[in-house]
Image (cartoon, helix red, strand yellow):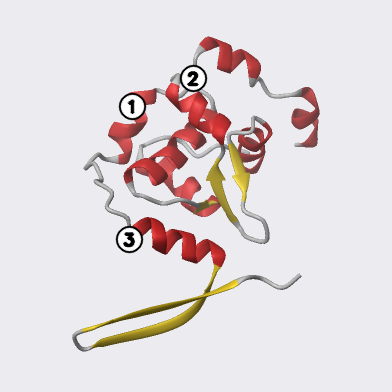
Amino acid sequence: MMAIEYKINISGAGLSFAKTIDQDKAKEIIYLCQDIKKIDISPAEYYRKFNPKRNPDKILVFAGYMENILGRRSFTLLELNEMFDRVGEKMPKNFTRDVNWAVSNKWLDRIKDSKKYYIAESGYSALSCNFSAEIIKETRMAKKLCKQY
């Protein structure tokens, strides 16, 4: 299956830029061009607002920071990984398992044919209720997932 391509053209005083890009990049550019007011808040301040306990909760908070504060619609595992250091948290011993846990919770999903992830609807719900006891109970790690690692 052939990937959909988009053409971007930007021109102005002394500037001319033209390039063919993929759909993910096109979505990011459109999002950046929208008039969005960003809040100046550090990753650590944002993290403390949620006070996440489990690693998938922390990963979702980092994804929330990237989207809600930085205006990023998608992010890589490396970008999520780096957030642990930025907020002064120890890196999980099994980061891949914890990301898969967040995905199995339907909080994050991977963009098809990409190494990027985005926050799914259930992820927004978990953030909006600040990881309620009910959400924590519903999203305990499945034994099947534990045995994979």
Q: Quadrant of residue 30?
A: bottom left
Sequence-earlier tag: 3 or 2: 3
Q: Secondary structure at mark 2?
A: loop
User: Which residue in the structure is indicated by mark 1?
Assistant: 48
Residue 54 left/right relative to 50: right
- The image's mark for residue 27 is none
User: Which residue in the structure is indicated by mark 3?
Assistant: 33
Identity of the residue drawn at 66% across and 20% down: 140
CA gap, disc 2 and disc 1: 13 Å
- Tell me the mark number nearer the camera, choosing from 3 and 2: 3
- The image's mark for residue 131 is 2
Is residue 36 visible to us here?
yes
Identity of the residue drawn at 62% across and 44% down: 109
Q: Secondary structure at mark 1?
A: helix
Q: Residues within 10 Å of mark 2 (few under 14, many from 20)?
A: many
Question: Which quarter of the figure is the C terminus placed in?
Answer: top right
Residue 83 place in picture, x, y as percent: 42, 44
In the image, residue 144 sits, relative to residue 103, either above or below, namely: above
Residue 31 place in picture, x, y as percent: 39, 56
Residue 96 place in picture, x, y as percent: 64, 43
Is residue 95 visible to us here?
no
CA gap, disc 3 and disc 1: 30 Å
In the image, residue 44 sits, relative to residue 10, either above or below, namely: above
Q: Amino acid at mark 1?
A: Arg
